[in-house]
Image: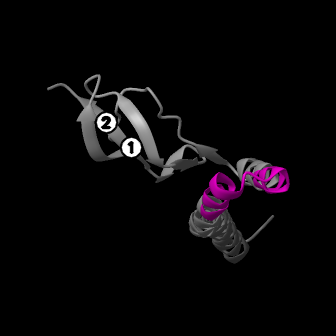
Amino acid sequence: MPNKKQAKDGQKNASKIKQLEEKLARSLADYSNLCKRIETQKESFYSIASASLMTKMIDVLDNFYLADNQLQDEGLKMAINNFVSVLKSEGLEEIEAQDKDFDHNFMECIQTEKGTKDKVLKIVKRGYLLNNQCLRPVQVVVGKQN
């Protein structure tokens, strides 16, 4: 039969074990939250770095398109198509604007001309989405009624 001291020590030990179990559970939850936060930050950093690189790449692509307009070279066209397919595989897509209604979320009107009101008449500079986010709006000429 346990004496009073042993019973008291048993209660203290049970209480201490319960406290340690609670502390362990909180620590595991904190660690899990930390892992989730780090993963979110990592995705955010990747997204920012990717957008920065893609912005530089579309400037190069603009130059390729300008050269193609002047040279009309089949080899250059193949290189451009290859470059565009690599950019697409990384989530870049061109904003379709020709003959569409003007959308200020994806388009920048740089000029208006006589034509169908609020319709894109001409694309001046291509625009792009990166993973469905507007990276660069398409610069357009928009119709206005006189």
- Decide: is 64 above or below 142: below
> Which secondary structure class fits the magenta region best?
helix
Q: Residue at x 41, y 42 (%)?
A: 106
What residue is shown with label 2? 142
Please give left or right for residue 116 compared with residue 122 in the image. left
Q: Position of residue 94 (x, y in %)?
A: 59, 43
Nearest the eye: 56 or 44: 56
Q: Position of residue 34 (x, y in %)?
A: 62, 67
Q: What colouring does the structure picture have?
A: one colour
Which quarter shows the N terminus? bottom right
Q: Position of residue 36 (x, y in %)?
A: 63, 60
- Report the span colored magenta: 63-80
Q: Does the CB distance between marks 2 and 1 fall below 8 Å? A: yes
Residue 83 visible to an observer of this rendering: yes
What residue is shown with label 1? 140
Nearest the eye: 4 or 9: 9
Q: Residues within 10 Å of mark 1 (few under 14, many from 20)?
A: many
Residue 37, by quadrant, is bottom right
Nearest the eye: 81 or 94: 81
Residue 29 visible to an observer of this rendering: no
Q: Residue at x 69, y 75 (%)?
A: 9
Please give left or right for residue 109 compared with residue 75 in the image. left
Circle 2: residue type: Val
Q: Is residue 48 magenta?
A: no
**For numbered disc 2, what is the local secondary structure?**
strand
Please give left or right for residue 125 compared with residue 87 in the image. left
- Decide: is 92 above or below 54: above
Outermost residue to the top: 116
Nearest the eye: 29 or 113: 113
- Decide: is 131 above or below 38: above
Which quarter shows the C terminus? top left
- Decide: is 9 above or below 75: below
